[in-house]
Amino acid sequence: MFPLDRRQFAASSFGGLAALMAMPTVLVRQPVVPDPITVVAPFKPDTLFLTWQRDPTTTMTAQWVGEWDATDDPTIYYGPTARTFFDTSPLKWDTAKTTATPFPQTELINFRSELTGLSPGTEYRMKIGRNSPTYKFRTMPAKATNELTFVSGGDCGVNPHAIENNKQAAKQDPWFAVIGGDLAYDNGTSPKTYLSWLRNYSKHMVDTKGRMIPMICCLGNHEVKGGYSKSRSDAPFFFAHFDGLYQDASYAALDFGDYLSLILMDTGHASPIIGAQTDWLDRTLRERTERPHLIVVNHVPCYPSFRAAEGPAGKLGTGEEQRKNWVPLFEKYNVDLVLEHHDHTFKRTHPMKDGLKDKNGILYLGDGSWGQLRNASKSTARSYIATASTSYHLTVHRIEAEQRFHMALEEGGKIVDICRTEKKVRRKG
Ligand SMILES: [Fe+2]
Ligand SMILES: [Fe+2]
């Protein structure tokens, strides 16, 4: 891990970004305009968002929450955006079925449609029925041969800072956003709060090319009624939307082809840290030692920047169970990076190994301040903290071949911190 200065980052980033944006020449044609007599107000659900249940190189899942009878055709119509100038044939639309299930604690319905068999690294257009706007999205590339940008953060809520960070995130043209828990602060009891957060995401998380930015989320304490040591049923809104990825448990691995794996943990909210989840982590990391990019996402930090790492007599400190049970596995399999949240600051640890600074150790980035903030003035007194600040922030991650750049941005776009991680040698345990 190497800190960079702003000029180095800019020099390495913007040329690459230009290459990323160099999409093939396309000509987009709108479908035939229907008879004016049949034209009605377009169907445009304000909670529409994208996520993944399985491989992001070939699938996409669209979901929205709304009234049962808001549209008589919730079928998803979709097809690749790219057309050559000389292709004058009518636009072709494939269709995907939409399922409808009750959205918890409301009279509303959750609509979900998974598109499968998509082409990797391809921009698509999408409509809901025949009377919605045409949305755009892109599948992840088959290989990480070019540069690839995504954003991460956590602890959002619905305040103006969360909205500004949404806008800032979208400006980075990320392929996706990782949100590491405490999404809306609905506490499993307020569908109104959850849907407000979702409306903000739906409205603002659209990139500069008009493409929707898919979200990947893990569970935090504020998704769960009671916060800790509860069950799935105590996090009704989270699992209403993400049970496709979290089918078997409240933790999961999401594999992007064979080049990137996100290991999404539950830091003791709907599953205990010790026991089945730790066994799963050992097995899951062992199976992914060949991945060039292996990234863990926690809600509660292993190395907290605000709360006490050590508990008072007889009680556990923040992240202590994780440091005892998960960190040895992170080190055994030499993961590339741990993204963690919950403490509401910006923080970067030193590379850590065996609880000590070590140049070959693991970097922990956090600490969840997309829309929530605590004072980080005392954080840097902790031996494991390299830098910390009281900043609403998100982090932009750019993968370039065997190295990764990590740039923390404040809501107004000011750079808080830049560092770099490189390809690691992993053993099979
Ligand atoms: Fe939080
Ligand atoms: Fe939290």
Image (cartoon, rainbow, N blue to C red):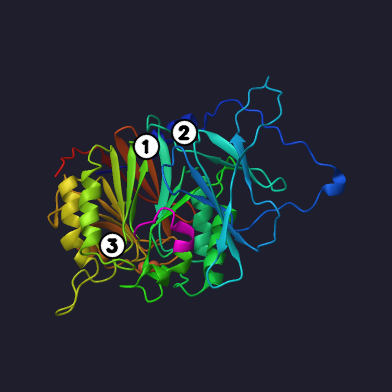
Q: Is residue 377 visible?
A: yes
From the viewer's perspective, is 66 left or right of 178?
Answer: right
Q: Position of residue 246 (x, y in %)?
A: 39, 56
Circles 1 and 2: CB distance less than 8 Å?
Answer: yes
The residue under label 3 is which amino acid type? Pro
Image height check: is 198 above or below 414?
Answer: below
Q: Position of residue 188 (x, y in %)?
A: 45, 72
Q: Earlier in the sequence, mark 1 or mark 2?
A: 2
At horizontal 23% and vertical 61% (from top left) the residue drawn is 276
Residue beneath disc 3? 301
Q: Position of residue 23 (x, y in %)?
A: 54, 29
Q: CA distance from mark 1 to mark 2?
A: 9 Å
Q: Secondary structure at mark 1?
A: loop
Q: CA distance from mark 3 to mark 1?
A: 28 Å
The residue under label 1 is which amino acid type? Gly
Does the stretch in magenta take in 182? no
**Ligand 1, image quadrant it occupies:** bottom left
